[in-house]
Image (spheres, rainbow, N blue to C red):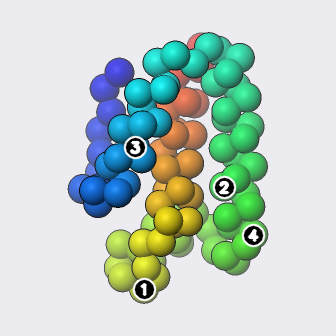
Amino acid sequence: MATTQKTSLSPRMQRVYNDIMSEWEMWTDDKTRESIIECQQRIARFEREHHMSSAEMRRKVISGEIDETHEMVSWSFDLDMLDEMLKELP
């Protein structure tokens, strides 16, 4: 599976990304659909808790307005994984 990354990842983000991608190939279609729902729910929770959209969060992290915390990294990976999972659905 080819993935393209828009920006360089920090070493911590790269490790998490590599772990997720190594598990990706073992998922079944049902598991993927379950994961999509779970991912969407986590993203919605992050947006509610931080009172900002996902696009706004990414812009603020990139510009340095907010720190790249573990929570922001998780949020960002959920966004990336959701995009990847949706592309893989039949």
Q: Which of marks 1 and 3 is nearer the N terminus?
A: 3
Identified at 66% across, 44% down, the residue is 39
- Position of residue 21 relative to residue 71, above or below, is above
Residue at label 3?
A: 17
Residue at label 1?
A: 65
- Position of residue 36 relative to residue 27, above or below, is below
Locate the C terminus by quadrant.
top right
Camera-side residue of 4 and 75: 75
Q: Which amino acid does label 2 sit on?
A: Ile
**Alpha-carbon span between mark 2 and mark 4:** 9 Å
Task: Classify residue 21 as left or right of residue 34.
Answer: left
Residue 9 in view in this figure:
yes
Residue 59 in view in this figure:
no
**Label 2 close to label 1 by CB (< 8 Å):** no
Q: Give how far across and how far down residue 52 sits, in percent.
A: 64, 74
Identified at 35% across, 47% down, the residue is 15
Q: Give how far across and how far down residue 75 sits, in percent.
A: 56, 58
**Alpha-carbon span between mark 2 and mark 3:** 17 Å
Residue at label 4?
A: 48
The answer to which image quadrant residue 32 occupies is top right
**Label 4 close to label 3 by CB (< 8 Å):** no
Camera-side residue of 11 and 39: 11
Residue at label 2?
A: 43
Task: Classify residue 30 as left or right of residue 74.
Answer: right
Q: Is mark 1 on a helix, strand or loop?
A: loop
Q: Which amino acid does label 3 sit on?
A: Tyr
Identified at 55% across, 30% down, the residue is 85
Query: Closer to us: mark 4 or mark 3?
Result: 3
